[in-house]
Image (tube, rainbow, N blue to C red):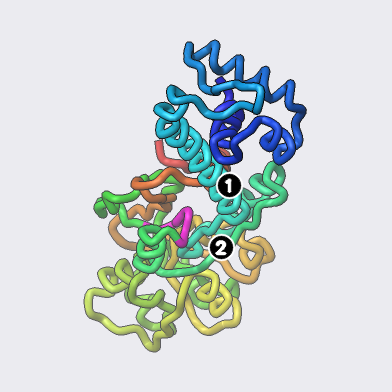
Amino acid sequence: MRIEQLEYVQAVTRLGSLRRVAEELHVSQPALSETLRNLERELGVELLDRRRSGARISAEGRELLPYIAQVVEAVDSLRRAADEQHRVSRMVRVGTVSAATVSLVLPAIREFRESHAQTQVEVVDAQQGEIHIALREGSFDLGLVNYLRGDDLAPEFHSTELLRGRPVVCVRADSRLARLSVVGVDDLLGEPLIVMRSGYVMHRFVHRLLDGRQPLFSYSVDGAEMGKIMVANGLGATILPDYSIQDDPLETSGVITWRPLDCRSTEVLLVAQRRKSTAPPQAARALHDALVRRAGALGVRAA
């Protein structure tokens, strides 16, 4: 049974003759008639009442029309859903807290583009809470967020752990702190500190690290990228996961560097998340897989 056979039955019912159906659908009348006879043989029902004056839907055929309509409508719905998925797959939207941009995110996007050259990728820097809202609403396909080890993962999302790292101090290469092998909290307090704005995991970590003590001066910024630029321009130091600094052009060129913190060990996780409630577009799954492969290549992906 083919869907066009059912559509032909509907057309005969609507137009009242095989001739009119053949003219409207641009098929030959003999081919149309033979197609419908094949359907009748398969169903074991005379769907058409054939007379010298023409063929019309039979009484038995009319009884089956509601079922035929259901099948045709289901197929139409499937086609519309496929068309919508194809349209959505033309754009993959990713929300990120701008962590591991150079070492993970950009190489994964580059790999994705090799097999999805026609698909646009929109990358939006945002706080974790904003990313979660956008994932729930469906305006982001994927979210890349940081967690501290021991944090509860949001239960409504599929979460894939990509990277593990440790908080480190990002400093300008010619700064006083760069001459230290390990940076303590007292060392940080004597320097201007560039802090992530409230809503970022690293803001929470720094607040806990300082335990109420205040640095010489502090800035508040959105995201690791702006923090590193400010460090490169000599405005202070910032605390980031090590994977947000490693391989950054500012680091590889020698402008910025990083030093470990003299504090109790804390792990920071970079996690890819998507909604559980709906199946992601194929392109979003492909980008997710590229992120996982790149994380594995870095050799620091969680087991």
The stretch drawn in magenta includes residue 141: yes
- The image position of residue 14, as x and y in percent, is 56, 40
Q: Along the line of sight, which residue is nearer the eye, 236 or 48?
A: 48
Cα distance between the residues tagged 1 and 2: 24 Å
Quick one: quadrant of the N terminus? Answer: top right
| 78 over 3 or under it: above or below | below
Seen in the image, is 64 located left or right of residue 285?
left
Examine the rendering and report whether any part of residue 181 can be seen. no
Three-letter amino acid code of the residue under disc 2: Val
Q: Earlier in the sequence, mark 1 or mark 2?
A: 1
Quick one: quadrant of the C terminus? Answer: top left
Q: Along the line of sight, which residue is nearer the eye, 246 or 156?
A: 156
In the picture, the disc for residue 123 is 2
Furthest residue to the front?
52
Q: Which stretch appears magenta?
A: 139-146
Q: Which residue is at 61% across, 30% downward?
A: 4
Q: Which residue is at 55% across, 80% downward?
A: 230
Q: Which residue is mark 1?
A: 83
Question: Which of the two discs, 1 and 2, sits closer to the camera?
Answer: 1
Label 2: few (<14), some (14–19) or many (≥20) C-alpha neighbours in 10 Å: some
Q: Along the line of sight, which residue is nearer the eye, 242 or 154?
A: 154
Mostly what secondary structure, the magenta segment?
strand
- The image position of residue 126, as x and y in percent, is 45, 69
Q: Is there CB contact under 8 Å for labels 1 and 2?
A: no
Seen in the image, is 290 located left or right of residue 74?
right
